[in-house]
Amino acid sequence: MKKHRDKSIVQITDAKIEEYARAMTTPESEDVKALVESSDAELEYIDMLSGNLVGQMLRMLIQVSGAKRILEIGTFTGYSAIVMAEALPDDGEIITMEMNIRYQELASKHFRQFDHQNKIKLLEGNARELVSGLSGDFDLIFIDADKLSYEDYFSQTLPLLKQGGLMVVDNVLWDGTVLDPEDHKAQALHEFNKIVSQDNRVEQLLLPVRDGVTIIRKK
């Protein structure tokens, strides 16, 4: 679903600068490009895909941190899971959660096609319920799901993140509407951003990349 069907999109970064940044960033693999084409053919809108700037940022964070075990909240069609799986060592693992049945079907198809090392495990259902069944520490957590539930996802998954581990949260600027929230999602994201900024268990960096990304490190 397009994020703001009845509203104009606020371009956070100058369009030419963002285009230049994409041109100067390592391109997506052929598998990921094929996944994007498949998603575009199956769905009316694919603006919920993380995109290459966020994808390459995730890849680098995994590589420089040595992350092996990842939790993803919000699979969509599998873009970010595949991007992260490509950066993991052979013994790495991603657990990804998706509630939407259509997205589950598409993600499952893409994982069968592109997850060559079988690193990805898709859990189908409500992440707020599924998280309670997880055990063990995660090296990295990526959140890109229901914006109204970000605060819940943060509070539920932070205990699962190892000390020194990273949490990455997408869409935290919501087309810039967090500056003057007028709808429920913008307000929820603004409140989430404030909660993270005031939590002494973590340190964080909010970057105006694409639709806004926060990188959180557990102390």
Image: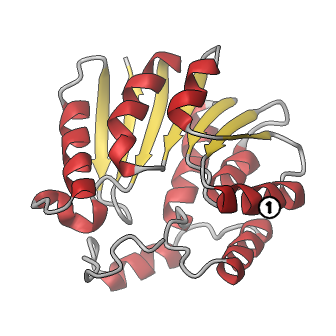
Q: Is residue 18 left or right of residue 88?
A: left
Q: Is residue 82 left or right of residue 130?
A: right
Which residue is more in the foreground, 100 or 136? 100
Label 1: how many Cα within 10 Å (few below 14, some 14–19, many 20+): many
In the image, what residue occupies the spot 44% across and 73% down?
21
Is residue 78 visible to us here? no
| Along the line of sight, the residue nearer the viewer: 104 or 60 | 104
Query: Where residue 217 sits: x, y (%)?
Result: 40, 28
The residue sitting at 64% across, 14% down in the picture is 136
Q: What is the total number of numbered labels drawn onto the structure image? A: 1
Q: Which residue is mark 1?
A: 110
Can residue 202 be seen in this snapshot? yes
**What residue appears at the point 61 percent right and 66 percent down from the top-left corner?**
26
Left or right relative to 159: residue 138? right
Per the image, label 1 sits on a secondary structure element best described as helix
Q: Which residue is the extreme one toward the left?
A: 180
Coordinates of residue 61 in the picture (x, y in percent): 54, 42
For badge 1, the amino acid type reads: His
Which residue occupies the foreground of this view, 60 or 11?
11
Say above or below: 17 vs 98: below
- Locate residue 93, reporting x and y percent: 75, 33
Image side of residue 197 versus residue 113, left or right = left
Give the percent coordinates (x, y) of residue 162: 52, 17
The quarter of the picture where residue 120 lies is top right
